[in-house]
Image (cartoon, coloured by chain):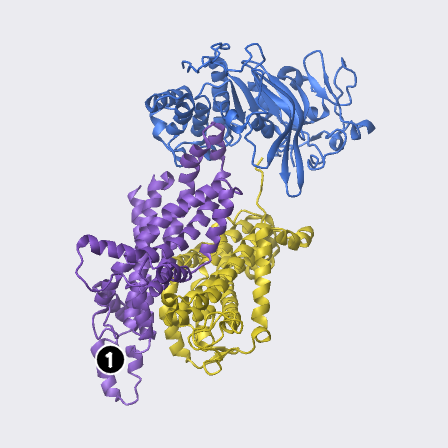
Amino acid sequence: MSLQPIAGTTDLGVGRWTTTGRRARTFVGRLLGRTDGLVGVVILAFFTVIALFPSVFVGPLEGVLSATGQPLDSPSLAYPFGTDELGRDLLNLTVHGARISMVIGLLATIITVVIGSTVGIVAGYVGGVVDNVLMRITDFFLVLPTIVLALILAPIILDVIGAQAELFGIRSTLLVIVIVIGLTSWATTARVIRSQVLSVKERMFVDRARVIGSGGGQIMRRHILPNVVNLIVAQSVLTFATAVFTETTLAFIGLGDPAAPSWGQILNNAQSAGAPGLGAWWYIVPPAAAVVLVVLAFTLLGNALDDVLNPKMLGRR
Amino acid sequence: MTGVREPGAVSATRGRRQVPLPRLADPAAPLLVVEDLAVRFSLPSGSVKAVDGVSFRLDDGEALGIAGESGCGKTTTALSLVRLLPANGRIRSGSVKLFGIDLVPKTEKQLARYRWREISIVFQGAMNALNPVRRVGDQIAEPIEVRLGRSRDASRKRAAELLDLVGIPGQRASAYPHELSGGMRQRAMIAMALACDPAIVIGDEPTTALDVMVQAQILQLLERLRRELGLSLILITHDLSVIAETCDRVMVMYAGKVAEEGPVTRVFTAPRHPYTQKLLSSFPNIHADRRTLDVIPGQPPDLRNPPPGCRFAARCPFVMDVCREVVPPEVTFGDGVRVACHLYPGRDAAGPPPRVVGATRTCDAASSTDPAP
Amino acid sequence: MSAHYILRKLVQAILTIVAIVALNFVLFRMMPGSPERATKNPHLTPEFIAAERAKWGLDKPLFPDQLVAFAISTAQGDLGYSIKYRGQPVVEVVADAAGPTVLLIGIGEAIAIVVGLWLGARSGWRRGGVMDRIGNSLSLIFYSMPYFVIGMPLIIIFAAGLGWFPTSGMTTPGGDKGPAEALFDLGRHLVLPVTAVALGLIGAYSILMRSSIVETRSEDYITTARAKGLPDALVLRSHAFPNALLPMVTLIAINLGYVVAGAITAEIVFNWPGLGLLTVQALDARDYPLLQAIFLLIAVSVVFANFAADIVYGYLDPRVRA
């Protein structure tokens, strides 16, 4: 298991986050002008297309009954990625896995960023006791081994809402993973956003707006939020990397949905089938490479966004 | 302190100096001669001509003040002497001759020989300039041990002596920077600058972050050390009164160029360059009840793309057509003052400086003393 | 380091543990098979339920009575009985599995801290250099890999393929082995799992150390050190590194929770008989008391590790020490 988003630990709090017209026009150019930005965007574009239209490329998801190949066949012309222990085409599984992994990642990211940003903005803007209480809770979640907590929470939540329930067409087993990742990984975002809000708050116009008579909620929406939105974007991209990473881990440990196999679930199947010991590398490499590429791409893109949106001073004098 | 013998070192010393000169030194050469120095910073948005064609000279035992608004290139000029520029800064041309040795073509490794042993720096705001996790005494002893090759004990002993010299009890050597007050930290920084008995000490706004009482104490200390040790000093500050009290000569810079340079007594009593005049009149007179504060309208030019003529033209009350097109040449007067301004065309130009009229207004004492916007 | 500082950090740690116990209590009341749910059985008479509730103290208010009772039994080490291990106290089951996990994480962390910090410091100090480009790219790749994704290829190549190391387990079963032989056997089993954990951590630590060094590099005291004409290596070693290390102490401790979770996946891959494997078994059997005990042990360990990190931080940073 790896860390929370990298940018959350770098000094994000000092830069200016203004978006001028000129900067907005050159934004895409500057992002794609960087190696990390370009590589990140290209990899993500590839996986996004696959995730949107998996059936166009490899046909419908193969199930246990619709499996067409021999068990554990190494790559061949008919099955370029080989087959799993049930004879399913691993190319088919990996491509469909993209959709499942990335949808879970996306939903979990939304929950994480919404909770994290709200807590960060409120704590940073309101300050005082509210800030203190919210930050103690945040620190608690930072220290807590959240993935281990997720291992208990997931079956409990599943038991409460029922295994067959669906929401927005997503089965409850997957939904549980989404909720668990969202609930347990917002703390880093909250911390990063809060420190940015604190520096925004120092600036004059907030005082002016307050004098004119706007309420706290209005100031947060109209004045604070636009100034931290760049940071939230960069943080979201990095959170997505963590979410895909965490989903893979949880699915591998056994919280996935065998009927809707994400990359982590495929790797779980591979482990159960004893693929590593049998030397069945083709069972492991495609889903593993997909996970690594997507996490890497989001991390690269997140850092590139961070740098482009938050230009650091080059010279001091 | 006694000299450290280097193989083949010229044993000649200069004045009070007890450490041998660098091997290549010309004993007859002036202490420091900077000629036509140009420094650029590369930014994503373009190349900043931060220092452009700056020349000056510093003699043994002399104190030179460099004045100007923030961003005029005074710190960059001083730091480029030993090439301590940020990673995006480069010396584009010019020479820095110390004892006649040009430092500009030296490699980083060769240049290390001259850092601190010949030119040391008292940085602004010693809280950040001192390493927060190391004891003050160790930080002072470090260059003595590493650069002069003394034993650790001897270095520590010398560090304690230096602290004594700047008015800090020697036993405070074991303190960490945060345990000292701002004034004490600045004293420790000065002690550190003296560690290798350097030829030149540069003070980069050494009193700026301090309150007025402490400022006065630090200035007195620098005065005393100058007198007792015969230091050669370059003092960078935007505070003209500091230069008036401490320095022999003053160099006024504007937008990366020298506007006026000469003996403090001459420049401060009869400023010739319109910028110097503005700068002096914008400075509050301590002896007057109501201060006459002259605010210079406008902003310094964008140094990524400086104007073709005089860089002060846009803000100058005496601006002429020629100022906007031709860079004014430097003219040296009989009293040793050097000015770069089209108001003084001839070489031996004489006559009283023109009076500034019109732009003067009276402000309350509470107004900002900083002419920069 | 002042007693006040240590005391403050200790109080924080204890409060965090209290919060964890309270969270555990909430989970305990929510989970399937909890007494609250068991009493919903329609076949039981109300009288019987009332009597049972009184017997187990469930008639008392949740707060403070039930919570306090729960906290007291937790403190006494009474965490209930395992379902999977046929009524064995979960504390015993967890204690047996903790050793191998501590061994795996301990060695992995030690290697990763030394190598990762060194690599990150070197990369950041010469940002854009050859070492930085190669080191940072590799670090990013390992950072993006869950430990089991690192572990699986290791098995395929070095165990199943080349046969240098065993594919799974902690010891070779059977046969009488002398102490030296047993230690060698353990070492052979340790190599691959430790490599998987260490590689993942090295990626993370070197990236973080790199950015810490890059930030430290622009500090004024580094300019001072350069102005002193000190050799570059000395500026790094005695000025940049000690300062860049400070945030790393906290980050390494905060990160420990994730390391444990990652180690769980590595244990699964290598069939390493630690907490990770136990977690999966408990999960499969829906053995909630066991899961809770594992969570409690790991959470409390992580809190203590953070407390230890605070003490180390205080030792390294004189501004805190005073």
| Residue C256: image location, x then y, percent | 36, 55
- Image height of C298 relative to C61, above or below: above
State which quarter of the image contains the C terminus of chain A: top right
Residue A209 place in picture, x, y as percent: 61, 54
Which chain contains the residue that carries disc 1? C
Residue A145 pos. (x, y %):
37, 61
Task: Name the quadrant containing residue B97.
Answer: top right
Asked if residue A243 lies left or right of residue B243, the reply is: left
The one nearer the camera, C68 or B198, is B198
Quarter of the image that includes the N terminus of chain A: bottom left
Q: Is residue A40 left or right of residue C96?
A: right
Name the residue located 60 percent from the left edge and 51 percent from the top edge: A34
Residue at 47% from the left image edge and 27% from the top image edge: C228
Chain depicted in blue: B
Rendered hue of chain A is yellow
- Work out whether residue A17 or residue C285 is closer to the camera in this orientation and state it: C285
Task: Please name the residue shown 64% across and 43% down the image.
Answer: B44
Query: Amino acid under label 1?
Result: Arg
Q: Secondary structure at mark 1?
A: helix
Q: Is residue A115 visible?
A: no
Q: Is residue B364 left or right of residue C210?
A: right
Q: Which residue is mark 1?
A: C53
- Chain identity for the colour purple used in the image: C
- Mark 1 is surrounded, within 10 Å at the Cα level, by few (under 14), some (14 to 19) or many (20 or more) other residues, namely some
Which sits in the foreground, C167 or A35?
C167
